[in-house]
Image (cartoon, rainbow, N blue to C red):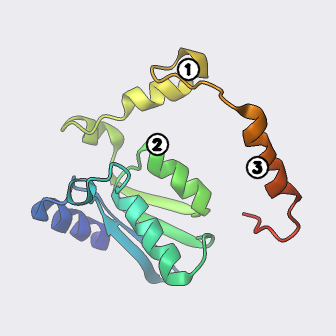
Amino acid sequence: MRSAIALARRGATAGDGGPFGAVIVRAGRIIGEGWNRVIATGDPTAHGEMVAIRDACGRIGNISLQGCVLYTSGQPCPMCLGAIYWARIERVFYGFGIRDAARIGFDDHFIYEQLARPAEQRAIPEIPLLRAEALEVLEAFAADPGRVRY
């Protein structure tokens, strides 16, 4: 956890983004690390956890982080939490909570509110378009016996 906090401090001090750092550990070894790089990269998805997941997957050459633990300076936002589940990370330890982050302007409450609503009642409309054409691609992928299952 101290490594995650040190990365958060380093990134925030450098002006890379907010005070969020993360490390991913497997079998007692750090296999991935990251800090918030939203400002440095101009990428709104470059949160500390996302950067650490990308780093870990790149280092081990696998999209699954099963058997890994994530340490993060701040409780993950909804986007990062989704990525944590997709990567199959088994446990998350965090320093400050989402309410702590909200006090200084990192407020994800509106996202949680939006996700709790039915799709047709959300602030950003989700509109189906060209379903048949998109389904052709989906079905072709599903029918491919050599596809990678994940």
Instruction: Say whether residue 114 is visible.
Output: yes
Residue depicted at x 23% and y 63%? 8
Q: CA distance from mark 3 to mark 2?
A: 28 Å
Q: Position of residue 16 (x, y in %)?
A: 19, 60
Q: Earlier in the sequence, mark 3 or mark 2?
A: 2
* Mark carried by residue 100: none
Kind of residue sitting beneath label 3: Val
As drawn, the residue found furthest toward the top would be 121
Q: Nearer the viewer, residue 21 or 100?
A: 21
The nearer-to-camera label among 1 and 3 is 3
**What residue is disc 3 on?**
137
- Dot 2 lies on which element? helix
- Dot 1 lies on which element? loop
Q: Position of residue 34 (x, y in %)?
A: 34, 68
* Mark carried by residue 78: 2
Circles 3 and 2, Cβ within 8 Å, touching? The answer is: no
Kind of residue sitting beneath label 1: Arg
Residue 95 occupies which quadrant of the picture? bottom left
Q: CA distance from mark 1 to mark 2?
A: 15 Å
**What residue is disc 1 on?**
117
Q: Earlier in the sequence, mark 1 or mark 2?
A: 2
